[in-house]
Image (cartoon, rainbow, N blue to C red):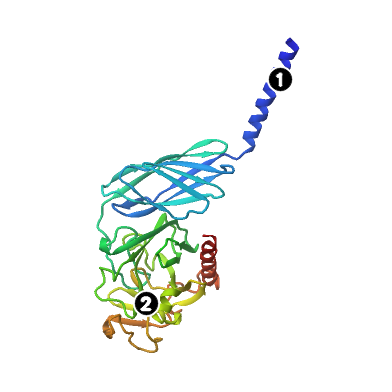
Amino acid sequence: MNVLSKKTIVLIVMSLLLAISIVDAFPATSSERVLPASVNTGEVFNVTINVSDYGSFGMVNETIPSGFEFMGMVSEDNITVNETDPYYLFYFFSIDEFTYTLKAPSTAGTYSFDGYLHSSIMAVDINNTQLSVVSISTPSSSSSGGGGGGGGGATNEAYANIALKDAQSKYLKADVNANYTFGKEGNPIIGVEFMPLINTGSINVLIEVLYGTSSTVDIEAPGRVYKNVNLWVGKGGWASEDTIASPKVMFKVAKKWLNEEGIDSVNIRLARYTNKWTVLSPEIIGEDDDWVYFSVEVPGFSPFAITALQDKVEGNTIPVSNDGSENNDSELEIVENAIDASSSSTDEGSNSLPGFEILTAIALVSMVCFFKRRS
């Protein structure tokens, strides 16, 4: 009996040692919450949760502070969410991060987020990140010259004119190309790209898709307008020729709309408003059964309109507005070749690779088509 008991003890000890060695063989499960340094009251912004070494599947239990409004997921690939305010359960697999969108409360203050990652191996706390919500004056809706400006969150746009908002945040590094991709239904902007000239924290790109002409604009865009949008990068005029170079916007237009309006895709333009409308000529970068995809360099970020001209712009031809009248020449500038090399804020010493922007645009369209087929 004593001999048997010793064997049993030995087996138990060996089993415990084996279990410990198995646990030690797994990398440490970890998770990190990434928030902006601060946001404005009422601002729409993104929260990213980084997860690693959670095994075959994972679950994050996230507690969102009172007063914040959960707006949805940036991407729903390989993840589902169970909303039980203020607790949100995110179930996922085969991803190393996910991002959700919130709207800040109307009351300024410091708010605390809390949560944990439960893996198939263990549970770990997510760092309790504090977020400062501030109440400041909103930025001017227009910008001039160089790389443009604009707000990244709260704007001067009339609330009733906003059909939807789409936002992305990224940490930026100098001379590393920044690509923001968007996929929310109803948003014609599929990407924003630029070269950061400085290291910075989290920079938010905010898109407001509008029901009509921006309330901050004095005159309607030329041509037959497909969509009106506001596009802001950073806060308080952060995006300028001192902070970014080679800004570019990628967008899409529905073939159904083109067919219904009798418009050729080569006549699509992107009009940008500062103190007048500047009409930029995009490049067609792809198409599928439902969409035509475009890319265009822009001088800055502000109100835009995706529009179609009745005839291809040549010289100083004035496009026809929606009501058939001619636009005042003082309110319109035609830029057939968008941004030429002499006016680009990227010099010959730029670290961007030749053709890199084109490859990025092609990859972006390929991703859109891939996820469309999956859906």
Amino acid carrying label 1: it is: Val
Give the answer, above or below, for where 37 lies relative to 309.
Answer: above
- Is there any visible trace of residue 156 in the rendered image? no
Give the answer, above or below, for where 280 lies relative to 199.
Answer: below
Residue 104 in the image, given as x and y percentages of width and height: 32, 50
Residue 319 in the image, given as x and y percentages of width and height: 33, 85
Tell which residue pokes out farthest to the front in this image.
260
- Is there any visible trace of residue 265 in the rendered image? yes
- 5 on left or right of 263: right
Residue 225 in the image, given as x and y percentages of width and height: 34, 76
Q: Secondary structure at mark 1?
A: helix
* Residue that badge 1 annotates: 10
- 66 on left or right of 340: left
Q: Residues within 10 Å of mark 2 (few under 14, many from 20)?
A: many
Q: Residue at x 51, y 36 (%)?
A: 123
Give the answer, above or below, for where 291 lies relative to 236.
Answer: below
Comparing 349 with 233, the one in front is: 233
Amino acid carrying label 2: it is: Thr
Q: Residue at x 62, y 38 (%)?
A: 26
Residue 307's tag is 2
In what quadrant of the picture does the N terminus appear? top right
To which quarter of the image does residue 222 belong? bottom left
